[in-house]
Amino acid sequence: MKKSLIALAVLAASGAAMAQSSVTLYGIADIWFGNVKTDGAGGTSVTQLTSGGVSTSEWGLKGSEDMGGGLKANFKLSQAYALDTGVATSGFNREAWVGLSGGFGEVKFGKVSSAYNDVEGAAGAAFGSGALGPIANAFVSDAEYTSRPANTMYYATPSFGGFNAMVSYSLDEKLAAVAANSLTVTPAVDAGVEIVSLGVAYSAGPFYAGLGYQTEDEVGSTVTAKYTQANVTYDLGVAKLLGAYGNVKNTAGLSGDDASEWQIGADVPLSSAFTVSTGYAKSKRSFTVGADDKVTVFSVAGAYSLSKRTTAYVGFATSKLDSTDVKTDRYAVGIKHTF
């Protein structure tokens, strides 16, 4: 009888522990079929089946443990993969972190989405699509900044009346050599990028505004890349208005390689299940050597919710590069499933 009571107590304690912690397998499976056509001399037309039309296909594990008093321990592991080939990237290349959250906000340590990345693209038209979106296809910053840096320490405040702020710092982990029997440290190997990232956001009813700023210092370089982006959305009910502005200094650490970029757009729900999103973006890039260049992109896409976790989408995007007068048209139809 005594042994039975002990066993029941152990099982009860185990059940309580299980109830206080959770681990979730989650992911995105997104694939699209379409055609990409480029005009002009040497133009091409490619029909393709490609992963990640709207969102990057990924899978991962995430979990949380309630430690009492409002304090939680959290973790996330995420890996990208190509749905068309089945090939996955190495390791948990998207995110890999552990942290704590509570009344003080949240801290994370590891390979973490930067504070700038938390607000970047928040007003993206065409559902923020990588294949069709104006921001993805026009903004220089979208292609160049580091979205999920390694060796990162991250902090986000709790929400105060709809306002919250984020800050993250990523170490370059530059290796150094120490001479024998000496306290002198001299640089030995260049490694990594030092990243300082800031973000602020405000949300109240139909209105959202976010501002992000990020600097990237590559070890061994004397030039700092600087990225700034502001996003604003306003939901009128009949349509959600989208606006974004970005500015880049020393793109990818190249002195004088600067860019200014903007996007306007709207999401228009035509029914409870079907939404059309359209947008126009333009970026202007200047170089220390060579002529300035411009890119313009127009996109329109529609998404139909087949269920709470599955969406079918179709879209068209056209872009033009001024320096070569080359136009690229992209047609796509795809499906996105979350789990």
Image (spheres, helix red, strand yellow):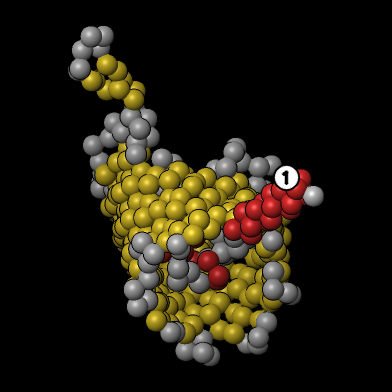
286 left or right of 231 in image: left
Q: Residue at coordinates 23% horizontally, 37% vertically from top-left?
A: 222
Estimate the x, y position of residue 317 in percent, counting from the top left: 57, 67
- The residue at the far front in this view is 1
Q: Tag 1, which secondary structure? A: loop
Please state which of residues 96 and 46 is positioned toward the viewer in this rendering: 96
Identify which residue is drawn at 50% across, 53% down: 73
- Give 145 or 157, whichever is nearer the viewer: 157
Q: Nearer the viewer, residue 315 or 36?
A: 315
Residue at 61%, 80% (x, y): give it: 275
Residue assigned mark 1: 86
Image point 34% across, 39% down: which residue? 171
The residue type indicated by label 1 comes to Gly
Residue 10 to residue 329: above or below: above
- Disc 1 crowd rating (10 Å Cα; few below 14, some 14-19, many 20+) is few
Residue 38, x across and y down, in percent: 58, 57
Q: Quadrant of the C terminus?
A: bottom right
Q: Is residue 335 visible?
A: yes
